[in-house]
Amino acid sequence: MEPEKIEDLKKFVDQCKINPSILNDPNLAFFTTYLQSLGARIPVKTEDVTMEDDIVESDIEFDETGVAVNPDNDDPPQKMGDTSVEVTEENLEAAQISKSKAMDAISEGKLDEAVEYLTEAILLNPCSAILYASRASVFVKMNKPKAAIRDADAALEINPNSAKGNKYRGMARAMLGQWEDAAKDLHVASSLDFDEEIGLMLKKVTPNARKIEDHRRKYERLRKERELRKAERPRPPQKKTSDAVSALNEGHVLSVHSKTESDTKFTAASSLSRLVILYFTAAWCGPCRFMSPLYQSLAEKHPKIVFVKVDIDEARDVAAHWSISSVPTFFFIKNGKEIDRVVGADKAGLETKIAQHGG
């Protein structure tokens, strides 16, 4: 071989050492086939697997102005009214007085005092959605979004069309960064009773909610594309035949101990269109002891026939399935169906049936 060609070959081998995937080039199929014939293992091409199997979602940048830095996570829940309590005229009047005091306190910036008055009003008139919504508005001002959400939920349970309930729950959810839920509540509030405060909150919340929706759509699309690529990948050939042959252990008698195990052998044999001989025996059976050595020698002589042995005391479910009444009994099975049988220690009859069906 010319020295120049040898040098070129060395360079090629060095390239293969650095990047073994070169050997997956279809133009080198003749070479890889030769290498495999010598027992070499060619690396499987794995390009784009990471891209297809692992989709890492990027972070979303939100406008988090107004998000609560230290929300009321550790605060105990506020007192709630008992809707089963009968509300009298006196209670209604007293609740109205407490509400008026709360409004005055709010105007003076005394928010804790306002909460106390509104709580008194709620306990007196627990069926008023407006009282819960009013207290929710104070909790929003106090930077207590979770308490505000509890009150807004109570208001909406009493009156699902409470504009203020939706408004203050939306504002509280925005304080917690729950942009999509906040946008839904604020849009409902806007449709029921629009005001400037709702409009300002929507301008802030809606872009963040849209970013989440766009982000979700983007990665749903990427995952669908990945699944399509996976579906289009050529699948490696299945080794059903070799697996079935391995399961049948040619030239040997196969002992089975359950119906599940026998079904597996029958399935493997059917996939190869093999004849199965199912031999039922028992340890206490004298004629069986006479037939067993012959059965083993027949298995060695006829490797393409599947010889199966079942002890009726070990695999009672198999014996029951085949309605065994005496042993030894030999069933001849093809594609899962009985085609013949031999009952008793009939050596000549067994060999004749094998010659008849095993061709």
Image: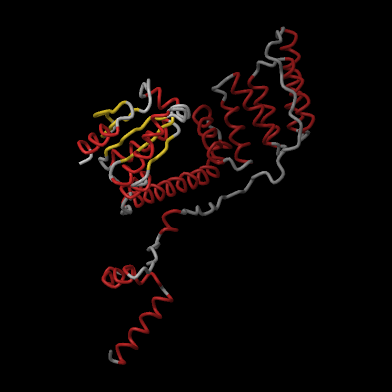
Q: In this view of the protein, which residue sits in the foreground, 46 or 12?
A: 12
Residue 311 sits in which quadrant?
top left
Percent position of residue 343, x then y: 31, 26
Say if 12 sits above or below 174 in the image. below
Task: Out of 228 and 199, give the one closest to the viewer.
Answer: 228
The structure residue drawn at horizontal position 58% and vertical position 35%, both measured from the top left corner, is 170
User: In the orientation shown, which residue stands out farthest toward the bottom?
Assistant: 3
Placement of the N terminus among the 4 image quadrants: bottom left
Q: Is residue 317 shown left or right of residue 202? A: left
19 left or right of 267 in image: right
Question: Residue 70's image quarter?
Answer: top right
Tell me which colouring the rendered structure shows. secondary structure
Residue displayed at 57% across by 24% down: 162
**Is residue 51 shown above or below 98?**
below
What is the x, y in percent for residue 76? 76, 31
Q: How many marks?
A: 0
At x 78%, y 32%, the residue is 112
Which image quadrant for residue 125?
Answer: top right
Task: Give the percent coordinates (x, y) of residue 99.
Answer: 73, 21
Position of residue 222 relative to residue 79, above or below, is below
Q: Is residue 52 above or below residue 340?
A: below
- Residue in the foreground of this view, choosing between 318 and 241: 318
From the top left corner, tell me how far across and down residue 359 is, in percent: 20, 41
